[in-house]
Each structure stands twice: as structure tokens, then as C-alpha cells.
């Protein structure tokens, strides 16, 4: 059975980043958002991401996306999924709780919205997946799994809450010179129960992701290097409760929880070595694009829906042949709506013409 379609037909922005008030109408296939730097191409892509994920891909603080000098922002999007029209509205005012409305009805929990409109965004900042801390790679796993598993998202939220409580308790032991065994055991048990579920989902994610990643890397980008992704967790091969018990003394001394799924990582390797150490810029970019396109395929398989694909300034350091290969790929029936930003409207137009790609729309950004 083929995946159902998903497309944002229009989006209206009020006080979002550099936009005071602007509406954009989109093609249901390929949208090319073009213009000079500083005109808001990335901000428009981020707003599209926000309408699907209820948060910015660029910052964790909602207040940071409000236009300078204003005290609120609003996003309104018309989204068509499986030929059914939906109206999504996000409103946020400083010092107040964010409101998310789906078809005019307020969502009581943000978590209930996540995954309804799956989305993958690829940006230059994705390089942090290679060079950044393990937190970046855990976020990649979390964003992926949360879009197709409500259980995972709820257990992750629970784990993070209990982790904060357990860390605060460990700190209080040090400050107050007392030790409460029963309370520590309560928090530890809750962490273990949630952590086991999260770890199981992450292991399954990597198991599904790796063969798709290999296929994309070798067939689309004609890569012949040995590339690998492995899940690295100190609770993967051992009993979670035993790991926590063995780390208790270290936790008490450090005043924080030192073991658990919040230290998980993904090992990204090229020819048996860490990618960040030996990969050239081109190799690292090809690896990242393959990883994110594999994420797309995984979401499509698990959701039965072609996610929205957002590509922000990804063509830098790629040769024309690889750029053409990406265009041929995303214009195929395997992909749904795609939004791409770039500064070179003329060059992109020639490339589309040379590759006989006709289903696209240019969205030029002038002064806003």
C-alpha cells in the first residue's frame, strides 16, 4: 500500500522572526524558496517545521522566535493529509502558555499533536550530529521516534522529569548531609522502568535505520566507503537496575545520575574510524544527507505517510551531479511535498530544466 500524501497548502506568519505579516501559498510537490541571504528563507522553513512539530528547529525557546520589538507570534497553516483539510494554529505571547489548535480545537497536551504531520528538516546545523555532543545524536533519535510512538514520547518526558528530581535529591544529600534510601529507590525504579522502554525503542530504531541508510548512501550518492551507525549505551548489554545500583556511590559523589539512557550515543564511522576525525567535508555532508533521508524513509514506513521534507541551504560543497541526483530523488513519487532554500535561482532553474523536472514552484523572497 502506497504512503498517503501530506502537504502544507498555505502558511500565514505574524511576528515570526523577521516577518511582521506574510502569507505563502505552496505547491504540493517541490517549492524553491530563493533570495539573497538575510531575507528569511531559513525562517520560513523553520515556521513550516514549527507548524508540524510545535517548536522551532533552531531554538528551544519560543520567545526567541518572536519578531524584535513585539510580544507575541502566530502561525496559521492549512495542511492537507490524505485529502482531508486541517487548520493548524500556534499562538504564543511572552510570559503566557503556548496555545496549539487543530481544526479550531485547543490541544490540551502538546504531546498529543506530535506525529500527526511528520516532518524531516535538513540544515547546515546538522553538522552538529557529527561534531557536537552526544546530546545532538540523542535528539535525532528522540525527534524520529516521537513522531511515530506516543509511548516513547510519554516515557521520554517522564524519564526527563524523574531524572531532574533524582539529581536534585542527590544534590540535597550532599548539601544537607543526609541520605534517604527509600526516596532514592523510588526515583531509581521509575528511571529504570522508563529507561528500559526508551532503550528498546532506540535499539529498534537503529536496527531499522542502518540498512536504509546504507541503501541511500550507496545508491543515491554512489558512496563506496565503509559507513556504519551503531547504538552506544551503557545499559544495552546489561541489566538496567544492576547498572544503576553499581553506579550509586559514584552518583552520590557526583551529585547527579551518571549512568542511564541520558548518556546514550550513536557512533558514526567511516572505514572503521570516527567520521568526525577522518571524514572530509564532502564525505561528512554525504553521510549526513544519507542519514536524514534514511530518517525520512523510516518515518514514511512507520507512519504510512510521506513526511514533509525541508532542505535548507544543503547544496553548498556538493557538485552539480550530486545536486541533480537529489532533485531527481525528491521529485520522484517516493517523496511528497519538498521545500528547498537556495540563493541561486537562475542556476537552480537551469538544473531543473536539464533534468526535465517540471513539478515545482519558485517562491522568491524580496524585502519583507
Image (cartoon, helix red, strand yellow):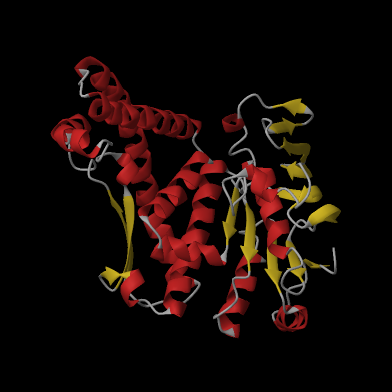
Nearest the viewer among 68 and 334 is: 68
Q: Residue furthest front?
A: 176
The reply to whether residue 208 is in sight is no
Q: Residue 179: horizontal and vertical position, in percent?
A: 20, 21
- When asked about the image quadrant of residue 173, the answer is top left
Q: Residue at x 41, y 33 (%)?
A: 160
The reply to whether residue 235 is in sight is yes
Q: Residue 189: horizontal and vertical position, in percent?
A: 27, 23
- When asked about the image quadrant of residue 224, the answer is bottom left
Asked whether, in this view, residue 115 is left or right of residue 256, the answer is right
Q: Is residue 242 above or below residue 64?
A: above
State which quarter of the image contains the N terminus: top right
Circle count: 0
- When asked about the image quadrant of residue 33, the answer is bottom right
Asked whether, in this view, residue 126 is left or right of residue 35, the answer is left
Q: Residue 108: horizontal and vertical position, in percent?
A: 65, 24
Q: Residue 296: horizontal and vertical position, in percent?
A: 54, 55
State which quarter of the image contains the C terminus: bottom right
Asked whether, in this view, residue 265 is left or right of residue 126, the answer is left
Asked whether, in this view, residue 285 is left or right of residue 168, the answer is right
Q: Is residue 165 above or below residue 270?
A: above
Q: Residue at x 39, y 47 (%)?
A: 205
Amino acid at each position: 500500500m502506497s504512503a498517503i500524501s501530506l502537504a502544507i497548502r498555505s502558511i500565514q506568519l505574524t511576528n515570526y522572526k523577521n516577518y511582521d505579516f506574510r502569507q505563502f501559498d505552496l505547491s504540493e510537490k517541490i517549492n524553491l524558496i530563493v533570495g539573497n541571504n538575510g531575507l528569511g528563507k531559513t525562517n520560513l522553513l523553520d515556521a513550516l517545521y514549527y507548524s508540524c512539530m510545535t517548536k522551532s528547529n533552531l531554538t528551544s525557546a519560543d520567545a526567541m522566535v518572536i519578531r524584535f520589538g513585539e510580544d507575541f507570534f502566530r502561525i496559521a497553516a492549512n495542511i492537507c493529509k490524505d485529502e482531508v483539510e486541517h487548520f493548524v494554529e500556534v499562538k504564543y505571547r511572552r510570559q503566557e502558555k503556548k496555545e496549539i489548535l487543530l481544526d479550531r480545537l485547543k490541544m490540551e497536551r502538546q504531546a498529543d499533536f506530535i506525529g500527526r504531520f511528520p516532518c524531516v528538516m535538513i540544515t547546515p546545523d546538522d553538522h552538529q550530529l557529527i561534531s557536537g555532543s552526544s546530546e545532538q545524536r540523542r535528539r535525532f533519535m528522540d525527534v524520529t521516534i516521537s513522531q511515530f510512538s506516543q509511548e516513547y514520547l510519554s516515557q521520554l518526558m517522564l524519564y526527563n522529569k524523574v531524572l531532574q528530581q533524582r539529581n536534585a535529591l542527590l544534590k540535597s544529600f550532599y548539601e544537607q548531609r543526609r541520605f534517604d534510601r527509600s526516596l532514592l529507590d523510588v526515583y531509581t525504579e521509575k528511571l529504570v522502568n522508563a529507561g528500559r522502554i526508551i532503550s528498546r525503542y532506540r535499539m529498534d530504531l537503529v536496527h531499522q535505520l542502518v540498512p536504509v541508510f546504507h541503501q541511500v548512501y550507496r545508491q543515491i550518492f554512489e558512496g563506496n566507503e565503509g559507513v556504519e551507525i551503531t547504538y552506544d549505551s551503557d545499559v544495552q548489554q546489561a541489566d538496567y537496575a544492576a547498572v544503576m545500583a553499581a553506579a550509586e556511590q559514584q552518583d552520590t559523589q557526583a551529585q547527579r545520575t551518571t549512568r542511564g539512557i541520558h548518556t546514550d550515543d550513536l557512533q558514526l564511522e567511516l572505514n572503521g574510524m570516527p567520521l568526525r576525525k577522518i571524514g572530509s567535508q564532502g564525505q561528512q555532508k554525504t553521510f549526513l544527507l544519507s542519514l536524514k533521508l534514511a530518517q525520512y524513509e523510516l518515518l514514511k514506513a512507520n507512519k504510512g505517510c510521506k513526511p514533509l521534507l525541508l532542505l535548507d541551504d544543503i547544496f553548498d560543497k556538493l557538485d552539480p551531479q550530486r545536486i541533480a541526483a537529489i532533485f531527481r530523488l525528491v521529485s520522484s513519487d517516493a517523496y511528497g511535498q519538498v521545500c528547498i532554500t537556495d540563493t541561486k535561482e537562475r542556476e537552480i532553474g537551469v538544473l531543473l530544466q536539464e533534468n526535465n523536472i517540471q513539478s515545482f514552484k519558485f517562491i522568491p523572497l524580496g524585502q519583507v
